[in-house]
Amino acid sequence: MTSTALLHGPTLRLAAVMPEDIPLIARWYEDADFMRRFDASPAMPKTVAEVTKYVEEQQQSSTAFPFAVRLLEGESLIGYLEVDGILWNHGTGWISLGIGEAGYRGRGYGHAAMTLGLDFAFGELNLRRIQLTVFAYNTPAIALYERLGFRREGVFREFLNRDGVLHDMLLYGLLRREWHTS
């Protein structure tokens, strides 16, 4: 059984994504800044039905764990975190985070959410490696991941074309033995 403290930090918690959360998450897909940092797909709105389908598929998967990122005070939904792409036989998986509410970006909530997500991945799921990708222009996220102990392991050169400009995508990895020693 998962300890409730595992999914709670001093300022926020990771919770199940509820049906009433979907319209807000869909609204985040109308924010070009969010989209261009969170997803390689063309920045375009998603419908409530599209977001619902995606979240339901993730919730039913044995290799994905989607979470709503909620403030402890007031329970406001401010982001989405997912541990997914798990290869159980290898003990590896991916993590992704998006702080959808613009007013909460750059205020430490990403660090708090990632800390909880990594504790969950390494502790509860017993994974030994977590990886992520980030666009080279997303310098705030890169700084966050490096503060958390992630190491840059590779570059997908000229992976992304945004407004006619080519950008690299970076691969970062973190091993369980490195977590909390950084």
Image (cartoon, rainbow, N blue to C red):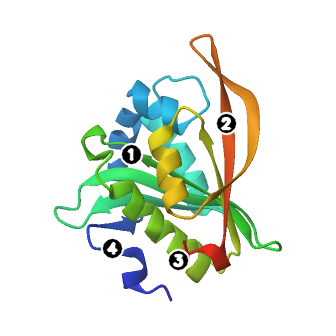
- Earlier residue among tags 4 and 2: 4
- Earlier residue among tags 3 and 1: 1
The answer to whether mark 2 and mark 3 are in CB contact below 8 A is: no
Give whichever of 162, 146 is nearer the camera. 146
Q: Residues within 10 Å of mark 2 (few under 14, many from 20)?
A: many
Residue 181 percent location from the top left of the image: 56, 77
Give whichever of 89, 132 is nearer the camera. 132
Give left or right: position of 114 versus 169.
left
- Earlier residue among tags 3 and 4: 4
Q: Quadrant of residue 22?
A: top left
Question: How far apart are labels 4 and 2 at the CA level?
Answer: 30 Å
Q: Quadrant of the C terminus?
A: bottom right
User: Residue 22: which numbered mark, if any?
Assistant: 1
* Residue marked by disc 4: 9
The vertical placement of 174 against 7, above or below, is: above
Q: Residues within 10 Å of mark 3 (few under 14, many from 20)?
A: few
Give left or right: position of 4 versus 55.
left
- Earlier residue among tags 2 and 1: 1
* Residue marked by disc 3: 180
Q: Given the current orientation, which residue lies at the most extreme right position?
A: 89
Residue 58 percent location from the top left of the image: 59, 56
Give whichever of 143, 62 is nearer the camera. 143
**Element on which disc 1 rests:** helix
Q: Quadrant of residue 127?
A: bottom right
Q: Residue at x 28, y 51 (%)?
A: 107
Q: Residues within 10 Å of mark 1 (few under 14, many from 20)?
A: some
The answer to whether mark 4 and mark 2 are in CB contact below 8 A is: no
**Element on which disc 2 rests:** strand
Question: How far apart are labels 4 and 1 at the CA level?
Answer: 23 Å
* Residue marked by disc 2: 169
- Earlier residue among tags 2 and 3: 2
